[in-house]
Amino acid sequence: MATNNPSMFLLTVNGQIEGANFPEFDNLYCKYCFVYGHDWVPSSGLEEGITQITCKGIQSSHKLIWNFPLETTFKSTNPSGWPQLVMSVYGPDAFGNDVIRGYGATHIPFTPGQHTRTIPMFVPEPSWRLQKFTSWLLGRRPEYTDPKVVAQGEGREVTRVRSQGFVTVSFHIMTKDMKKLGYDTGPSGPANTQSATSSWSTEGQPYNM
Protein backbone atom coordinates (compact mmCIF):
# COMPACT_ATOMS: atom_id res chain seq x y z
CA MET A 1 0.00 0.00 0.00
CA ALA A 2 1.45 3.37 -1.02
CA THR A 3 1.99 5.93 1.70
CA ASN A 4 1.38 9.63 1.25
CA ASN A 5 4.53 11.47 2.37
CA PRO A 6 4.23 15.13 1.37
CA SER A 7 7.44 17.10 0.87
CA MET A 8 5.88 20.48 1.67
CA PHE A 9 2.90 22.05 3.41
CA LEU A 10 0.41 24.68 2.25
CA LEU A 11 -0.77 27.89 3.94
CA THR A 12 -3.89 29.58 2.59
CA VAL A 13 -4.60 33.16 3.64
CA ASN A 14 -8.04 34.68 3.13
CA GLY A 15 -9.38 37.82 4.76
CA GLN A 16 -9.56 41.54 4.27
CA ILE A 17 -7.94 44.82 5.17
CA GLU A 18 -10.96 46.12 7.04
CA GLY A 19 -10.03 49.72 7.72
CA ALA A 20 -7.92 52.17 9.65
CA ASN A 21 -7.99 54.79 12.36
CA PHE A 22 -6.04 57.97 11.56
CA PRO A 23 -7.72 60.80 13.49
CA GLU A 24 -5.68 63.53 11.82
CA PHE A 25 -6.03 62.40 8.19
CA ASP A 26 -8.65 61.55 5.58
CA ASN A 27 -8.87 60.24 1.99
CA LEU A 28 -6.35 57.46 2.55
CA TYR A 29 -5.46 54.29 0.64
CA CYS A 30 -3.34 51.31 1.56
CA LYS A 31 -0.68 49.37 -0.36
CA TYR A 32 0.13 45.88 0.85
CA CYS A 33 2.61 43.13 0.10
CA PHE A 34 3.71 39.82 1.63
CA VAL A 35 7.27 39.25 2.85
CA TYR A 36 8.45 35.66 3.36
CA GLY A 37 11.55 33.50 3.68
CA HIS A 38 13.61 31.81 0.98
CA ASP A 39 11.87 28.45 1.41
CA TRP A 40 8.42 29.92 0.77
CA VAL A 41 6.81 30.05 -2.67
CA PRO A 42 3.43 31.69 -3.52
CA SER A 43 1.34 29.17 -5.45
CA SER A 44 -1.82 31.19 -6.09
CA GLY A 45 -3.40 34.56 -5.38
CA LEU A 46 -1.90 38.04 -5.24
CA GLU A 47 1.33 38.93 -3.45
CA GLU A 48 0.65 42.66 -3.43
CA GLY A 49 -2.13 45.12 -4.09
CA ILE A 50 -3.62 48.53 -3.43
CA THR A 51 -6.98 49.48 -1.94
CA GLN A 52 -9.38 52.14 -3.05
CA ILE A 53 -9.25 55.65 -1.56
CA THR A 54 -11.68 56.01 1.32
CA CYS A 55 -12.88 58.89 3.44
CA LYS A 56 -14.34 59.03 6.92
CA GLY A 57 -18.04 58.41 7.40
CA ILE A 58 -20.46 60.86 8.93
CA GLN A 59 -21.29 58.62 11.89
CA SER A 60 -17.67 57.64 12.60
CA SER A 61 -15.34 60.63 12.58
CA HIS A 62 -12.14 58.57 12.82
CA LYS A 63 -12.86 55.24 11.09
CA LEU A 64 -11.78 54.63 7.50
CA ILE A 65 -13.34 51.57 5.83
CA TRP A 66 -11.68 49.63 2.99
CA ASN A 67 -12.90 46.01 3.32
CA PHE A 68 -10.30 45.08 0.70
CA PRO A 69 -10.00 41.31 0.13
CA LEU A 70 -6.85 39.26 0.70
CA GLU A 71 -6.44 35.85 -0.91
CA THR A 72 -3.21 33.96 -1.46
CA THR A 73 -1.66 30.52 -0.91
CA PHE A 74 1.94 29.69 -0.02
CA LYS A 75 3.85 26.45 0.01
CA SER A 76 7.00 25.70 2.00
CA THR A 77 9.14 22.94 3.46
CA ASN A 78 9.63 24.55 6.88
CA PRO A 79 8.07 27.38 8.90
CA SER A 80 11.23 29.50 9.01
CA GLY A 81 10.50 32.81 7.31
CA TRP A 82 6.75 32.59 8.02
CA PRO A 83 4.98 35.21 5.82
CA GLN A 84 4.31 38.72 7.04
CA LEU A 85 1.81 41.25 5.73
CA VAL A 86 3.35 44.70 5.20
CA MET A 87 1.11 47.75 4.77
CA SER A 88 1.84 51.31 3.65
CA VAL A 89 -0.90 53.91 4.03
CA TYR A 90 -0.82 57.03 1.85
CA GLY A 91 -2.86 60.20 1.64
CA PRO A 92 -2.73 63.82 0.46
CA ASP A 93 -0.95 66.57 2.35
CA ALA A 94 -2.00 70.22 2.46
CA PHE A 95 -0.62 70.74 -1.05
CA GLY A 96 -2.29 67.68 -2.60
CA ASN A 97 0.84 65.54 -2.71
CA ASP A 98 0.55 61.84 -1.87
CA VAL A 99 2.69 61.25 1.23
CA ILE A 100 3.20 58.32 3.55
CA ARG A 101 0.87 58.28 6.56
CA GLY A 102 1.98 55.02 8.14
CA TYR A 103 3.93 51.77 7.82
CA GLY A 104 3.05 48.58 9.64
CA ALA A 105 3.55 44.81 9.52
CA THR A 106 2.20 41.67 11.17
CA HIS A 107 2.92 37.97 10.86
CA ILE A 108 0.22 35.87 9.26
CA PRO A 109 -1.47 33.99 12.16
CA PHE A 110 0.05 30.58 12.83
CA THR A 111 -3.12 28.75 13.88
CA PRO A 112 -5.99 27.88 11.50
CA GLY A 113 -9.27 29.74 11.93
CA GLN A 114 -10.51 33.31 12.20
CA HIS A 115 -8.20 36.05 13.48
CA THR A 116 -8.29 39.84 13.75
CA ARG A 117 -5.20 41.99 14.08
CA THR A 118 -4.93 45.70 14.86
CA ILE A 119 -1.55 46.87 13.62
CA PRO A 120 0.05 50.05 15.00
CA MET A 121 1.48 52.22 12.25
CA PHE A 122 4.48 54.53 12.22
CA VAL A 123 6.22 57.04 9.97
CA PRO A 124 9.93 57.92 9.62
CA GLU A 125 10.91 61.29 11.03
CA PRO A 126 13.58 63.73 9.80
CA SER A 127 16.62 64.04 12.05
CA TRP A 128 16.73 67.84 11.97
CA ARG A 129 14.06 70.53 12.27
CA LEU A 130 15.24 72.16 9.05
CA GLN A 131 14.81 68.86 7.21
CA LYS A 132 11.33 68.53 8.67
CA PHE A 133 10.32 71.99 7.46
CA THR A 134 11.87 71.46 4.02
CA SER A 135 10.14 68.10 3.55
CA TRP A 136 6.79 69.64 4.54
CA LEU A 137 7.30 72.58 2.18
CA LEU A 138 8.32 70.43 -0.79
CA GLY A 139 5.83 67.64 -0.12
CA ARG A 140 8.62 65.06 0.15
CA ARG A 141 8.19 63.31 3.47
CA PRO A 142 10.77 60.72 4.56
CA GLU A 143 9.78 57.24 3.41
CA TYR A 144 11.39 53.88 2.73
CA THR A 145 12.45 53.14 -0.84
CA ASP A 146 11.35 49.55 -0.22
CA PRO A 147 8.49 49.09 2.30
CA LYS A 148 9.55 45.46 2.84
CA VAL A 149 12.27 46.75 5.16
CA VAL A 150 9.48 47.20 7.72
CA ALA A 151 9.25 43.42 8.09
CA GLN A 152 12.97 42.74 7.98
CA GLY A 153 14.17 45.07 10.71
CA GLU A 154 17.75 45.27 9.42
CA GLY A 155 19.00 48.86 9.48
CA ARG A 156 15.86 50.19 11.18
CA GLU A 157 17.65 50.68 14.48
CA VAL A 158 19.10 53.95 13.16
CA THR A 159 15.78 55.23 11.82
CA ARG A 160 13.84 57.78 13.84
CA VAL A 161 10.10 57.03 13.73
CA ARG A 162 6.83 58.28 15.22
CA SER A 163 3.70 56.24 15.98
CA GLN A 164 0.68 57.27 13.93
CA GLY A 165 -2.63 55.45 13.44
CA PHE A 166 -3.82 51.83 13.32
CA VAL A 167 -4.95 49.40 10.61
CA THR A 168 -7.31 46.48 11.26
CA VAL A 169 -6.98 43.24 9.28
CA SER A 170 -9.07 40.06 9.51
CA PHE A 171 -7.67 36.65 8.52
CA HIS A 172 -9.11 33.23 7.80
CA ILE A 173 -6.24 30.74 7.86
CA MET A 174 -6.10 27.19 6.51
CA THR A 175 -3.12 24.83 6.49
CA LYS A 176 -2.47 21.49 4.81
CA ASP A 177 0.04 18.71 5.58
CA MET A 178 1.78 20.56 8.40
CA LYS A 179 1.13 17.74 10.88
CA LYS A 180 2.41 15.17 8.39
CA LEU A 181 5.71 17.07 8.34
CA GLY A 182 5.85 17.25 12.14
CA TYR A 183 4.51 20.77 12.70
CA ASP A 184 1.48 21.31 14.94
CA THR A 185 0.18 24.88 14.87
CA GLY A 186 -3.26 24.12 16.32
CA PRO A 187 -4.29 24.33 19.99
CA SER A 188 -4.26 21.14 22.02
CA GLY A 189 -7.56 19.39 22.64
CA PRO A 190 -10.65 18.60 20.58
CA ALA A 191 -11.03 22.17 19.30
CA ASN A 192 -8.42 21.52 16.62
CA THR A 193 -10.40 19.44 14.12
CA GLN A 194 -9.49 17.84 10.83
CA SER A 195 -11.82 17.08 7.96
CA ALA A 196 -12.42 13.34 7.51
CA THR A 197 -12.04 13.65 3.73
CA SER A 198 -9.29 16.25 3.49
CA SER A 199 -5.98 17.03 5.13
CA TRP A 200 -6.82 20.73 5.27
CA SER A 201 -7.17 22.05 8.81
CA THR A 202 -10.70 23.38 9.10
CA GLU A 203 -10.80 24.89 12.55
CA GLY A 204 -12.80 28.05 12.67
CA GLN A 205 -14.41 27.67 9.27
CA PRO A 206 -17.96 29.05 9.13
CA TYR A 207 -20.89 26.69 8.78
CA ASN A 208 -24.29 27.51 7.34
CA MET A 209 -27.00 26.88 9.86
Image: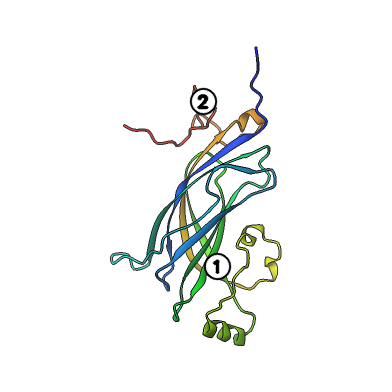
Quarter of the image for residue 57 reads bottom left
Q: Residues within 10 Å of mark 1 (few under 14, many from 20)?
A: many
Place of residue 130 in the rendered image (x, y in percent of width and height, measured from the top left): 61, 87
Q: CA distance from mark 1 to mark 2?
A: 42 Å
Residue pictured at 51% horizontal, 60% vertical? 31
Residue pictured at 70% horizontal, 71% vertical? 158
Where 185 falls versus 149 (above or below)?
above
* Furthest-bottom residue in this view: 130
Quarter of the image for residue 92 reads bottom left
Q: Check disc 2 and report the residue beneath it.
A: 198
Q: Residues within 10 Å of mark 2 (few under 14, many from 20)?
A: few
Place of residue 156 in the rendered image (x, y in percent of width and height, measured from the top left): 67, 66
Horizontal arrangement in the rendering, residue 135 relative to residue 50 (left or right): right
**Amino acid carrying mark 2 in the image:** Ser
Q: Check disc 1 and report the residue beneath it.
A: 122
Nearer to us: label 1 or label 2: 2
Place of residue 203 in the rendered image (x, y in percent of width and height, measured from the top left): 48, 34
| Colour mode of the rendering | rainbow
Quadrant showing the C terminus: top left
Depth check: give the residue in front, 139 or 208. Answer: 139
Quadrant showing the N terminus: top right
Depth check: give the residue in front, 148 or 112. Answer: 148
Where 206 falls versus 116 (above or below)?
above
Residue pictured at 44% horizontal, 80% vertical? 94
Q: Which mark is residue 175?
A: none
Residue pictured at 28% horizontal, 65% vertical? 59
Quarter of the image for residue 4 reads top right
**Amino acid carrying mark 1 in the image:** Phe
Horizontal arrangement in the rendering, residue 180 relative to residue 201 (left or right): right
